Amino acid sequence: MNTNLKKAIVCLKREFVNTPTLLAMGESAIITNLKNRRTLIVLIIVIGILYFVLGDMNGFMSQSNLNKEIQVKQISSTEMSKARYTRKGSGAFIDWIDVELNQDEINNIVNWINSVPDSDRIALNQIPSNTSISAGIVFKLKAGKEIRIQYDLEKIYITRTDRWTGQMIYTIDQENLRDFFDKQLKGFYFGEDKVNKS
């Protein structure tokens, strides 16, 4: 046999041995594909965990934050003020009167807010700009945060900075707290209990 032919056959044999078979290539592709899928699944799981642990996307976390109870022992001081409309000459004026709350009133306010069910708490991005607040309470907390409770004769707005997600605003529907504000505001509008909208 020709020497050159022998060399060519030997080279082909070597090349064939060093070239992976289609089966081996298929197995390699499948293994790589499975590794990519596992990586993708792990990545999706990690993103899901981060979403629930770190994220506040107006869903589960935000709702649970609205429900965090206020604890009386965390309150370091309280302030309350209410509006009073008066006439002086031909003009009308609004004075803000400070109201001192006793411990029973503070306890009641905290209990009333804590008793509000989820269905009566509505999250807001901000208090509407056309809102006219008539009375408000601020609970200063020991951690340097605060809880504001504001009343506009219709709705009660809660603004909290004691949440790790930042400032949170929501409205509540609580009859006892509304009655408390209404009693405090007796005669506040030029001697009347309510604003005349006529």
Image (cartoon, rainbow, N blue to C red):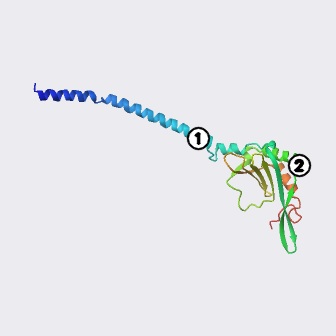
The image quarter in which residue 110 lies:
top right
The image quarter in which residue 91 lies:
bottom right
Q: Residue at coordinates 48% horizontally, 33% vertically from top-left?
A: 38
Q: Secondary structure at mark 2?
A: loop
Pick the front one: 87 or 179: 87
Amino acid type at circle 1 is: Leu
The residue lying furthest to the top in this view is 1
The residue lying furthest to the left in this view is 2
Residue 32 in percent (x, y) is at 41, 33
Amino acid type at circle 2 is: Asn
Number of disc labels: 2
Assess whether mark 2 and mark 1 are in contact (beta carbons under 8 angstroms). no
> Between marks 1 and 2, how big is the CA–CA gap?
43 Å
Task: Of the two numbered discs 1 and 2 on the same chain, state the one appearing first in sequence.
Answer: 1
Which residue corresponds to mark 1? 50
Which residue corresponds to mark 2? 102
Q: Residue at coordinates 85% horizontally, 75% vertically from top-left?
A: 90
Residue 13 in percent (x, y) is at 22, 27
Work out whether residue 115 can be spotted: no
